[in-house]
Amino acid sequence: MQRFENKVAVVTGAASGIGKAAAQRLASEGASIMCLDLQEQALDELRAELSGTGACVETLRCDISDESAVIAAIQACLDRFGKLDVLCNVAGILRFDHTHEISLADWNRVLSVNLTGTFLTCRESIPHLLQSKGNIVNVASIAALAGQPWAGAYAASKGGVLALTYNIAVDYAKQGLRANAVCPGGVATPMLGEFRLPEGGDLKLLDRVTPPNGMAGPEHVAGVIAMLASEDGSHINGEYIRVDGGTHA
């Protein structure tokens, strides 16, 4: 399939995990891509990989919680490719804490990346997406839909991402801009690999978030992102899709 031929996409968090898989999938279907992340070496490796397949790829180190960095990144995309059709917000951070032990600094950091960062990239992209009749796919989480142990800050941030997605969908529907979200759960990514059980945490609580048939790969989420961002999702707006293997069915 070449569903993204002559399309330009920005993918945040593109250096690893779901973001990397999304960039690979969109590139394989013909998209020109601006890949944003903080991991410069991993971005360089991704650029080499995708360029080797003939894809048109640019990479840029960007902290999406930094307003000036986001403004510069979206402008860099426009300078390079001349337009923007798809924004995929994948970048995020995850902490595991008992809620009564989360410091304000850690709380603010999670929200600044996961929620404020998503807002900033959406805000800067929307004027250009309106011109192209493009769309946004935000990565939320099943933590936004049901209780998840030790993830108070993360769940709050992803709940905010869902609410933001709904509002963008309503605000701009009549102008031809769509906004949707995916809610992954139980996906084998480097971020999940950083999990450490909080002191005194009950391992049995993890049963709530463990897929019955095992962990998914990032590519499973990337396939849903690509569908939503393509013409196959042209009549889907203001929706979320769980990608959790039936964990919360």
Image (tube, rainbow, N blue to C red):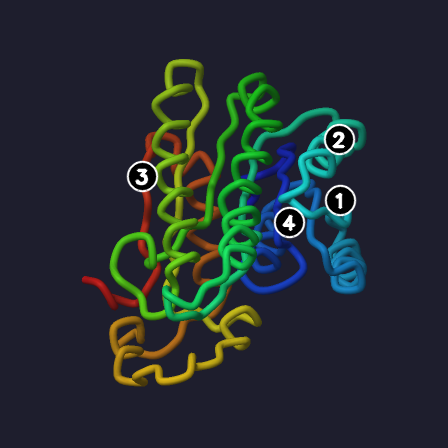
Task: Tell me: residue 21, above or below residue 84.
Answer: below
Task: Tell me: residue 170, above or below residue 91.
Answer: above
Label 1 SS: loop
Residue contact at pointers 4 and 3, CB within 8 angstroms:
no
Q: Which mark is residue 239?
A: 3
Label 4 SS: helix
Coordinates of residue 8 in the picture (x, y in percent): 65, 35
Residue contact at pointers 1 and 2, CB within 8 angstroms:
yes
Question: N-terminal of the two: label 1 or label 3?
Answer: 1
Residue closer to the observer: 20 or 208: 208
Judge depth for marks 1 and 3 and give the one in front: 3
What is the CA distance from the residue labelled 4 to the residue labelled 2? 14 Å
What is the CA distance from the residue labelled 1 to the residue labelled 4? 8 Å
What is the CA distance from the residue labelled 4 to the residue labelled 3? 24 Å
- Residue holding disc 2: 81
Judge depth for marks 4 and 3 and give the one in front: 3
Coordinates of residue 15 in the picture (x, y in percent): 67, 59
- Residue holding disc 1: 56
| Quarter of the image where one finds residue 246 | bottom left
Question: N-terminal of the two: label 1 or label 2?
Answer: 1
- Residue holding disc 4: 27
Q: Is residue 222 shown left or right of residue 160? A: right
